[in-house]
Amino acid sequence: MRYGHDQMNMWKINGRKFIIRYLICLAALIALAAGYWYLVRSAMMARAREDASLTARYIESRIKDMEKLADIPAAWLDAEGDAAKDAIAASEDSTQYKDAFQRLAKALYDADRMAVIELAPAGTVRYAFPREAHESVIGADLVGEIGDGLAREDLSHEMKVIGPSFIGHLGTVLGFCVPVYYEDGSFWGYTVIAMKLPDALEELALERLTEQGYDCALRCKNDSGSMKAEWIGGTSKSTGSMSSVSIDIYGKEWILSVRPVSGWVSIGGIVLSVVVAAALAFLLAWILEKRKEARDEAMGKLRSDAKHDKMTGLLNHTASAEAIDEALQTVEGGVLLLIDVDNFKSVNDTAGHLAGDEVLIEVANAMRTTFRRNDILGRYGGDEFIVYMLGDISIPDFSVKASQFQRKIRKIPIGQTGKYAACSIGGARRCVETPTAEALVKRADEALYTSKGNGKDRFTIYDDSGSTVIVTPKQDENRRDHDFTLVE
């Protein structure tokens, strides 16, 4: 039964304080979890930026490679000489140059990445490959085809990269316009290669990011200076919560944005963290509750030990005096008793100190079973005990209790000697002359002295006036019970 009771106490908690403690623990654990997921997100974003930066550098190098491809038709024209340049510019139907251009363009052309290869003397398209798909642009103004990025008055500029631009029959393209000159240095026109976007960048670029588990978006800022960026390619047109890096492509800002397909943090992981935090918070709150109870219990025991006699468990001298003083201030009436074990020194000398300790313990037990629960019981020192009976105690009431107590003491054996203990009692009733514990103890001590002087093993009490002492008659050796008599 005791085990079951202890088990019940183990699970018993203080509801309101426990809830407060639980909420504090939960808030702390959720804060830790939030910090953990913030670090996870920061680490993932740093990793994403690193991966995006690697891809951005690859895109830059890829565009540089496209630029080199764009130089090849210009180099071919320079090798053919001014006659070929003049024939193409005059739009002469020379199969020699047309066929040579077609062979060169066919060797360069990559249908997956390129939209068109063109020769545009003085800004007008004369040759285009593949010809079948671009018959409509032959004879057209290059400015109108490529867009506003190539101004007619600025045709003799160095190579220009136009776009990204959306051209109806080509889609989104990046145009490489390489200037070509006559041998005398005068301007002839442009060779143009228009690269499909994002197809020209997919290999080991955007596809690589997809394989790494990212959603990505490649955009280019408008020439107008608008904050909006035009989408070029990628797996997502929504760039919210993405991590971005900038790429400078011939003076234009391209933006590569990435985010993990599964998100920066795992929703399932966050939910699990909250569930675990709730469970751990409950466990921590319970442990703290039990630790507090154990600490309170230990502190209570320390306070109790400081007030109680270690051997008998009764109040010690100091605690007895304090308790009696407090009772005098709160309860009217009362009787203070001093109890002294008769001939206790001889008990220790003849039966030993262990037997003497047993006698003191049994005297304390007799006090507990004789006097009332609310009476103050203490060990006043050595073999002397103190009792303060609260309330209006009459002399007959006192004598009955004292007599009962002495009968119990006479049944306490003294070791193996065959002898039994006895005690003398002195009492003092509270009155105007005894307002403090010290005054009561002084009168009770005088009454105790009277009991000892009249043969021991008896009780004596002062009446209210303090002029009369009540003393038990000298006992009959064969009769342990006796009445009290009034002694003037």
Image: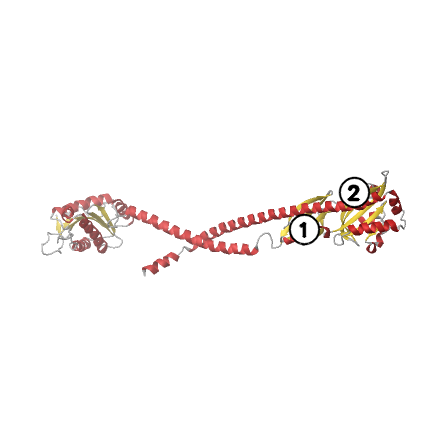
Observer-nearest of 173 and 336: 173
Could you say which disc has been placed on residue 423 in the image? none
**In the depicted structure, whether residue 4 falls above or below residue 336:** below
What residue would you read off at disc 2?
A: 159
Give x and y (percent) for residue 321.
26, 45
What residue would you read off at disc 1?
A: 204
Give x and y (percent) for residue 148.
80, 46
Disc 2 or 1, which lies upstream in sequence?
2
- What crowding class fits label 2: few (fewer than 14 Cα within 10 Å), some (14-19), or many (20 or more)? some
* Colour basis: secondary structure
Q: In the picture, which quadrant includes the N terminus?
A: bottom left
Q: Looking at this view, name the residue that lies furthest to the bottom.
A: 1
- What crowding class fits label 1: few (fewer than 14 Cα within 10 Å), some (14-19), or many (20 or more)? some
Observer-nearest of 277 and 467: 277
Residue 223 appears in which quarter of the rendering?
A: top right
Disc 2 element: loop
| Gap in angstroms between the C-alphas marked 2 and 1 | 26 Å
Observer-nearest of 281 and 38: 38
Q: Amino acid at mark 2?
A: Met
